[in-house]
Image (cartoon, rainbow, N blue to C red):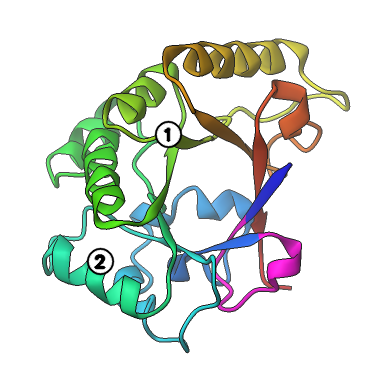
Amino acid sequence: MKRLLLTGIPHSPPSQGTPIYCPALQGLTGGQADLAMVMPRIDNNRALFATDRTADGTYAGVLTCDPFGTADSFLRRLDDHGYSGVANWPSAILFQGQVKQLMASMPATSDLEYAWLAGAKRYGFQTLAFFRSLEQGRAALNAGLRHLVLHPGLITQTDDGPPDLLIASLRGLIEKLHRQAEGVEILFYEHAALNNNIRAVDVGADGSVAYLAQT
Protein backbone atom coordinates (compact mmCIF):
# COMPACT_ATOMS: atom_id res chain seq x y z
CA MET A 1 0.00 0.00 0.00
CA LYS A 2 1.35 3.42 -0.96
CA ARG A 3 2.54 5.57 1.96
CA LEU A 4 3.49 9.25 1.98
CA LEU A 5 4.62 11.58 4.75
CA LEU A 6 3.47 15.18 5.16
CA THR A 7 6.31 16.97 6.92
CA GLY A 8 8.16 20.20 7.55
CA ILE A 9 11.44 18.32 7.87
CA PRO A 10 13.68 18.73 4.82
CA HIS A 11 15.19 15.55 3.40
CA SER A 12 13.15 13.21 5.61
CA PRO A 13 14.10 9.52 5.22
CA PRO A 14 12.37 8.14 2.09
CA SER A 15 12.36 4.69 3.72
CA GLN A 16 9.47 5.87 5.92
CA GLY A 17 7.41 7.01 2.94
CA THR A 18 7.52 9.44 0.04
CA PRO A 19 7.89 12.95 1.53
CA ILE A 20 5.48 15.83 0.94
CA TYR A 21 7.77 18.65 2.05
CA CYS A 22 5.91 21.69 3.38
CA PRO A 23 8.33 24.11 5.10
CA ALA A 24 5.55 25.96 6.96
CA LEU A 25 4.96 22.82 9.02
CA GLN A 26 8.41 22.79 10.60
CA GLY A 27 8.04 22.60 14.38
CA LEU A 28 4.27 22.08 14.30
CA THR A 29 2.29 19.22 15.77
CA GLY A 30 -0.16 17.26 13.65
CA GLY A 31 -3.08 19.27 15.02
CA GLN A 32 -1.34 22.59 14.39
CA ALA A 33 -0.52 21.53 10.83
CA ASP A 34 -4.22 21.78 9.94
CA LEU A 35 -4.01 25.54 10.60
CA ALA A 36 -0.84 26.16 8.61
CA MET A 37 -2.59 28.38 6.07
CA VAL A 38 -3.59 30.91 8.75
CA MET A 39 -0.29 30.76 10.66
CA PRO A 40 2.01 33.22 8.81
CA ARG A 41 5.27 31.79 10.12
CA ILE A 42 7.45 31.76 6.98
CA ASP A 43 7.18 32.23 3.23
CA ASN A 44 6.39 28.58 2.53
CA ASN A 45 6.83 28.66 -1.23
CA ARG A 46 10.15 30.47 -1.10
CA ALA A 47 11.40 28.10 1.61
CA LEU A 48 10.85 25.14 -0.74
CA PHE A 49 14.10 26.20 -2.42
CA ALA A 50 16.10 26.91 0.76
CA THR A 51 17.39 23.34 1.04
CA ASP A 52 19.68 21.30 -1.16
CA ARG A 53 18.19 19.74 -4.27
CA THR A 54 15.49 17.27 -3.24
CA ALA A 55 15.60 13.50 -3.51
CA ASP A 56 13.80 11.74 -6.34
CA GLY A 57 10.09 11.39 -5.70
CA THR A 58 9.67 14.25 -3.22
CA TYR A 59 6.46 16.27 -3.44
CA ALA A 60 6.32 20.00 -2.70
CA GLY A 61 3.59 21.17 -0.35
CA VAL A 62 2.54 24.39 -2.07
CA LEU A 63 0.53 27.39 -0.88
CA THR A 64 -1.31 27.69 -4.18
CA CYS A 65 -2.98 31.03 -3.36
CA ASP A 66 0.38 32.82 -3.13
CA PRO A 67 -0.15 36.06 -5.12
CA PHE A 68 3.53 36.61 -5.85
CA GLY A 69 5.15 35.41 -9.06
CA THR A 70 3.67 33.40 -11.89
CA ALA A 71 2.71 29.73 -11.87
CA ASP A 72 4.90 28.91 -14.88
CA SER A 73 8.10 30.32 -13.41
CA PHE A 74 7.37 28.76 -10.02
CA LEU A 75 6.72 25.33 -11.52
CA ARG A 76 9.90 25.61 -13.55
CA ARG A 77 11.87 26.32 -10.35
CA LEU A 78 10.25 23.35 -8.61
CA ASP A 79 11.24 21.14 -11.52
CA ASP A 80 14.79 22.45 -11.54
CA HIS A 81 15.05 21.83 -7.78
CA GLY A 82 14.14 18.17 -8.18
CA TYR A 83 10.54 18.01 -6.98
CA SER A 84 8.56 15.27 -8.71
CA GLY A 85 5.10 16.27 -7.54
CA VAL A 86 3.02 18.96 -5.86
CA ALA A 87 0.25 18.93 -3.26
CA ASN A 88 -2.17 21.61 -2.06
CA TRP A 89 -0.89 21.97 1.50
CA PRO A 90 -1.22 24.39 3.33
CA SER A 91 -4.85 24.18 2.24
CA ALA A 92 -8.21 25.91 2.48
CA ILE A 93 -10.16 22.63 2.54
CA LEU A 94 -10.97 22.81 6.26
CA PHE A 95 -12.47 26.30 6.28
CA GLN A 96 -16.20 26.55 6.84
CA GLY A 97 -18.83 29.23 7.41
CA GLN A 98 -17.69 32.83 7.79
CA VAL A 99 -14.01 31.91 7.75
CA LYS A 100 -14.51 30.17 4.40
CA GLN A 101 -16.17 33.31 3.01
CA LEU A 102 -13.36 35.53 4.30
CA MET A 103 -10.67 33.27 2.84
CA ALA A 104 -12.48 33.20 -0.51
CA SER A 105 -11.99 36.97 -0.75
CA MET A 106 -8.18 36.53 -0.74
CA PRO A 107 -8.90 34.42 -2.89
CA ALA A 108 -8.18 31.07 -1.23
CA THR A 109 -10.58 28.22 -2.00
CA SER A 110 -10.31 24.51 -2.67
CA ASP A 111 -11.56 25.04 -6.24
CA LEU A 112 -8.69 27.42 -6.95
CA GLU A 113 -6.25 24.95 -5.42
CA TYR A 114 -7.49 22.20 -7.74
CA ALA A 115 -7.24 24.51 -10.75
CA TRP A 116 -3.63 25.25 -9.79
CA LEU A 117 -2.86 21.55 -9.40
CA ALA A 118 -4.42 20.86 -12.80
CA GLY A 119 -2.01 23.38 -14.30
CA ALA A 120 0.89 21.65 -12.56
CA LYS A 121 -0.30 18.32 -13.94
CA ARG A 122 -0.26 19.74 -17.47
CA TYR A 123 3.28 20.94 -16.81
CA GLY A 124 4.27 17.33 -16.06
CA PHE A 125 4.13 17.09 -12.27
CA GLN A 126 2.51 14.34 -10.27
CA THR A 127 -0.27 15.85 -8.18
CA LEU A 128 -1.93 15.13 -4.84
CA ALA A 129 -5.21 16.90 -4.12
CA PHE A 130 -6.19 17.09 -0.46
CA PHE A 131 -9.96 17.22 0.11
CA ARG A 132 -12.36 16.93 3.04
CA SER A 133 -15.83 16.39 1.58
CA LEU A 134 -17.61 14.64 -1.28
CA GLU A 135 -18.18 18.03 -2.93
CA GLN A 136 -14.47 18.85 -2.82
CA GLY A 137 -13.52 15.39 -4.05
CA ARG A 138 -15.83 15.70 -7.03
CA ALA A 139 -14.44 19.17 -7.77
CA ALA A 140 -10.92 17.71 -7.81
CA LEU A 141 -11.99 14.95 -10.20
CA ASN A 142 -13.78 17.46 -12.42
CA ALA A 143 -10.53 19.44 -12.59
CA GLY A 144 -8.87 16.36 -14.09
CA LEU A 145 -7.04 15.26 -10.95
CA ARG A 146 -6.90 11.53 -10.22
CA HIS A 147 -4.70 11.25 -7.13
CA LEU A 148 -6.52 12.50 -4.04
CA VAL A 149 -5.95 12.57 -0.27
CA LEU A 150 -8.98 12.41 2.01
CA HIS A 151 -8.63 14.42 5.22
CA PRO A 152 -11.01 13.03 7.88
CA GLY A 153 -12.03 16.50 9.04
CA LEU A 154 -11.69 18.02 12.47
CA ILE A 155 -13.83 15.47 14.32
CA THR A 156 -12.11 14.43 17.53
CA GLN A 157 -12.34 10.81 18.60
CA THR A 158 -14.18 10.53 21.93
CA ASP A 159 -13.68 6.87 22.88
CA ASP A 160 -10.99 4.22 22.83
CA GLY A 161 -12.25 2.30 19.82
CA PRO A 162 -12.64 3.08 16.13
CA PRO A 163 -15.67 5.38 15.60
CA ASP A 164 -17.79 3.12 13.39
CA LEU A 165 -20.10 5.84 12.05
CA LEU A 166 -17.17 8.00 10.95
CA ILE A 167 -15.45 5.02 9.32
CA ALA A 168 -18.64 4.12 7.44
CA SER A 169 -19.03 7.71 6.27
CA LEU A 170 -15.44 7.96 5.04
CA ARG A 171 -15.63 4.56 3.34
CA GLY A 172 -18.86 5.53 1.58
CA LEU A 173 -17.31 8.79 0.38
CA ILE A 174 -14.31 6.97 -1.09
CA GLU A 175 -16.53 4.41 -2.81
CA LYS A 176 -18.59 7.15 -4.47
CA LEU A 177 -15.49 8.89 -5.83
CA HIS A 178 -14.03 5.61 -7.09
CA ARG A 179 -17.22 5.09 -9.08
CA GLN A 180 -17.18 8.59 -10.55
CA ALA A 181 -14.05 8.28 -12.70
CA GLU A 182 -11.60 5.71 -14.01
CA GLY A 183 -8.12 5.43 -12.58
CA VAL A 184 -8.84 7.28 -9.35
CA GLU A 185 -6.42 6.75 -6.46
CA ILE A 186 -7.56 7.94 -3.04
CA LEU A 187 -5.18 8.03 -0.10
CA PHE A 188 -6.30 8.58 3.49
CA TYR A 189 -4.69 11.10 5.83
CA GLU A 190 -4.14 9.11 9.01
CA HIS A 191 -4.64 11.96 11.47
CA ALA A 192 -3.25 10.60 14.74
CA ALA A 193 -3.96 13.89 16.53
CA LEU A 194 -7.72 13.38 16.07
CA ASN A 195 -8.52 9.77 15.21
CA ASN A 196 -5.65 7.55 16.21
CA ASN A 197 -7.45 4.29 15.49
CA ILE A 198 -8.62 4.97 11.92
CA ARG A 199 -6.29 3.64 9.23
CA ALA A 200 -6.39 3.69 5.45
CA VAL A 201 -7.34 0.03 5.31
CA ASP A 202 -10.41 0.70 7.51
CA VAL A 203 -11.92 3.14 5.01
CA GLY A 204 -11.01 1.33 1.80
CA ALA A 205 -8.33 3.79 0.73
CA ASP A 206 -5.56 2.98 -1.76
CA GLY A 207 -2.81 4.18 0.56
CA SER A 208 -2.04 6.56 3.38
CA VAL A 209 -0.52 9.90 4.24
CA ALA A 210 0.85 10.36 7.76
CA TYR A 211 2.20 13.44 9.51
CA LEU A 212 5.88 13.40 10.46
CA ALA A 213 6.72 15.97 13.14
CA GLN A 214 10.12 16.97 14.44
CA THR A 215 11.15 15.22 17.62
* Amino acid on which disc 2 is placed: Leu
Q: Which residue is mark 2?
A: 75
Crowd rating for badge 2 (residues with CA inside 10 Å; few <14, some 14–19, many 20+) = some
* Figure label count: 2
Q: Mark 2 near mark 1, Cβ–Cβ under 8 Å?
A: no
Residue nearer the viewer, 191 or 126: 126
Query: Which of the 4 image quarters holds residue 1?
Result: top right
Image mark for residue 173? none
Relative placement, left or right, of 76 versus 94 is left
Q: Residue at x 88, y 27 (%)?
A: 160
Q: Secondary structure at mark 2?
A: helix
Left or right position of 3 against 34: right
Nearest the camera: 126 or 197?
126
Q: Residues within 10 Å of mark 1 (few under 14, many from 20)?
A: many
Query: Residue 183: horizontal and vertical position, in percent?
Result: 49, 28
Residue 82 lies, in percent from the top left, at 42, 76
Under tag 1, what secondary structure? loop
Q: Which quarter shows the C terminus? A: bottom right
Give, as a single range, the part of the protein colored magenta.
5-17
x and y percentages locating residue 173 in the rendered image:
54, 15
* Residue 11 drawn above or below residue 196: below
Q: Which mark is residue 146?
A: 1
CA separation, marks 2 and 1? 19 Å
**Is 199 placed above or below 106 here?**
above
Q: Reading the chain from its start, which is encountered first: label 2 or label 1?
A: 2
Magenta includes 187?
Answer: no
